[in-house]
Image: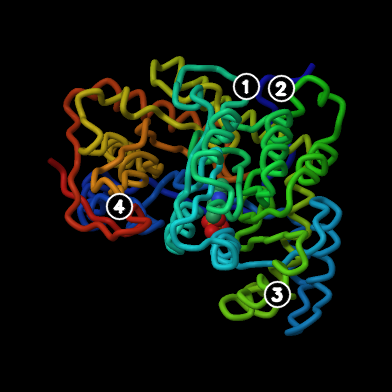
């Protein structure tokens, strides 16, 4: 019998102590950080669900691989070991390592995006969004409407709306679209997967118009496992076969290896086009490093080469997606609304529904993030108006995202079920006093990626 929530397919060999500091100390820490959890000291956090990015536990094989790191400036063995894994799994003609996913995005935007041009996707993640805007481009999100309905249990809520995509291309014209993207899984929309059927339809439209197709592949393995579980015809294929089928549809991809490659630092940029690859390498050399290390140490490349395969392991993926499903089900039992079904890497609490009395411009999800720390020393991240509201340069009006979410991202292979029980119990306590919680206002906010450095004051 397969358990509903498979136990960890590993046991713990090294531990790292964590502690819950007293309530008064938590209160002082919040104040000191301007109520921005990004600005807190990690040692003051008990359970850190800020992100699943670079926060996973490496395996014994990855730690062993670090020792094999070849730190040669050019042509290191580490690069060739990574290359053989990348070629095997993704199948693109060329690739470069980068220090993170956003470095790959920056290079891609630098090579392709000109001011005033549009880049469609299901939903861009914040760094992708900002890298396109930083080049004067305009990121456009064309996810299906179901994605905005938190209770809708559509199995592939990350899908792009193909009719909207066509209409959009017709409206702005092909020459104003230097590339088209899709994010798997859709991080900004709840870690929801994109179906193979939808990926094929996206690829077909982009190809028809001659628009290069790039996949933001940070969580491709989780997406492929969802395809195996939910899409007819894929139940007997391996996750790796599904991945090959997915990437064969695209002209390239960028990836944060800090997600499904289970490393603490690293990224990838893959392309098929020869000329683009030349330009990519020139940008890389300018900003990251020589093309065989791309801003990383040789040992990082080796850890990534091993982690890419571990991220595809199906026992691991069953346990991993089981963890998020478990936390979501505990919250549902406690009457706390989350995006349904649970995403791959985290649970997204619908903070707008927890605090219906707090309007979006007073940041209900930020308020929930602060309460979760105040109550239990737990750190989540706001994915709502702090992160995504923006001033439209054309209309000079503020645009607010459709949902105010608190993301509880689960680091890979790091926390156990009893940690998740504690998180669910803490949220239940907050819910019981929800009506007394107030919103926040900015005391400082930069123009781009403001959630990282903004400061707040309670209202
Ligand atoms: C994390 C992430 C990125 C950016 O990667 P970094 O390694 O943090 O720079 C881009 N896209 C998605 C979908 C991500 O989750």
Q: Residues within 10 Å of mark 2 (few under 14, many from 20)?
A: some
Q: Indicate which disc residue 393 carries.
A: 4
Q: How is the image coloured?
A: rainbow
Point out the tag, 3 or 1, that comes first from the N-terminus: 1
Q: Indicate which disc residue 230 carries.
A: 2
Point out the tag, 2 or 4, that comes first from the N-terminus: 2
Q: Residues within 10 Å of mark 3 (few under 14, many from 20)?
A: many
User: Do the residues under discs 1 and 4 have CB atoms within 8 angstroms?
Assistant: no
User: Do the residues under discs 2 and 1 have CB atoms within 8 angstroms?
Assistant: yes
Q: Indicate the secondary structure of the residue bearing disc 3.
A: loop
Residue behind mark 1 = 155
Q: Indicate the secondary structure of the residue bearing disc 1.
A: loop
Residue 55 visible in the shown view:
no
Point out the tag, 2 or 1, that comes first from the N-terminus: 1
Q: Nearer the viewer, residue 23 or 107?
A: 107
**Left or right placement of residue 255 versus residue 441 in this view:** right
Where is residue 209 drawn, in percent x and y? 67, 44
Point out the tag, 1 or 4, that comes first from the N-terminus: 1
Q: Indicate which disc residue 293 carries.
A: 3
Point out the tag, 3 or 4, that comes first from the N-terminus: 3
- Indicate whether 199 appears above or below 97: above
Q: Image point 75% across, 52% down: which residue?
A: 308
Point out the tag, 2 or 3, that comes first from the N-terminus: 2
Q: Indicate the secondary structure of the residue bearing disc 4.
A: loop
């Amino acid at each position: 019998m397969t358990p509903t929530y498979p136990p960890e397919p590993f046991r713990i060999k090294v531990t790292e102590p964590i502690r819950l500091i007293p309530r008064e100390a938590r209160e002082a820490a919040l104040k000191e950080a301007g109520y921005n959890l990004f600005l807190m000291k990690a040692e003051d956090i008990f359970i850190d669900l800020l992100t699943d990015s670079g926060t996973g536990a490496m395996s014994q094989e990855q730690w062993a691989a670090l020792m094999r790191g070849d730190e040669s400036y050019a042509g290191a063995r580490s690069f060739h070991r990574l290359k053989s894994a990348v070629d095997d799994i993704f199948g693109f003609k060329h690739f470069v390592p980068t220090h993170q996913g956003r470095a790959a995005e920056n290079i891609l935007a630098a090579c392709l995006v000109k001011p005033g041009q549009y880049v469609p996707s299901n939903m861009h993640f914040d760094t992708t969004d900002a890298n396109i805007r930083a080049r004067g481009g305009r990121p456009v999100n064309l996810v299906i409407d179901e994605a905005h309905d938190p209770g809708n249990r559509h199995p592939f809520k990350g899908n792009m709306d193909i009719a909207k995509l066509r209409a959009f291309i017709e409206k702005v014209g092909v020459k104003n679209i230097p590339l088209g993207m899709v994010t798997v899984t859709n991080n900004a929309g709840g870690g929801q997967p994109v179906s193979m059927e939808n990926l094929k339809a996206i690829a077909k439209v982009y190809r028809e118009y001659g628009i290069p197709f790039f996949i933001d592949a940070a969580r491709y393995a989780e997406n492929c496992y969802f395809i195996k579980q939910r899409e007819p015809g894929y139940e007997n294929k391996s996750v790796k076969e599904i991945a090959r089928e997915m990437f064969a549809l695209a002209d390239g991809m960028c990836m944060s290896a800090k997600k499904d490659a289970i490393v603490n630092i690293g990224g990838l940029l893959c392309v098929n086009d020869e000329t683009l690859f030349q330009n990519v390498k020139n940008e890389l050399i300018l900003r990251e490093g020589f093309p065989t290390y791309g801003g990383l140490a040789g040992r990082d490349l080796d850890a990534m080469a091993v982690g890419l395969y571990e991220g595809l392991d199906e026992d691991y993926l069953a346990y991993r997606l089981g963890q998020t499903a478990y936390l979501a089900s505990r919250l549902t039992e406690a009457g706390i609304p989350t995006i349904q079904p649970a995403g791959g890497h985290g649970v997204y609490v619908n903070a707008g529904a927890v605090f219906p009395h707090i309007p979006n411009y007073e940041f209900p999800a930020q308020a929930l993030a602060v309460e979760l720390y105040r109550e239990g020393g737990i750190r989540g991240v706001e994915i709502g108006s702090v992160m995504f509201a923006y001033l439209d340069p054309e209309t000079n009006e503020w645009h607010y995202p459709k949902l105010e979410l608190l993301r509880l991202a689960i680091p890979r292979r790091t926390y156990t079920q009893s940690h998740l029980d504690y998180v669910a119990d803490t949220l239940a306590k907050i819910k019981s006093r929800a009506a007394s919680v107030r919103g926040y206002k900015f005391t400082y906010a930069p123009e781009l990626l403001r959630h990282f450095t903004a400061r707040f004051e309670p209202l």
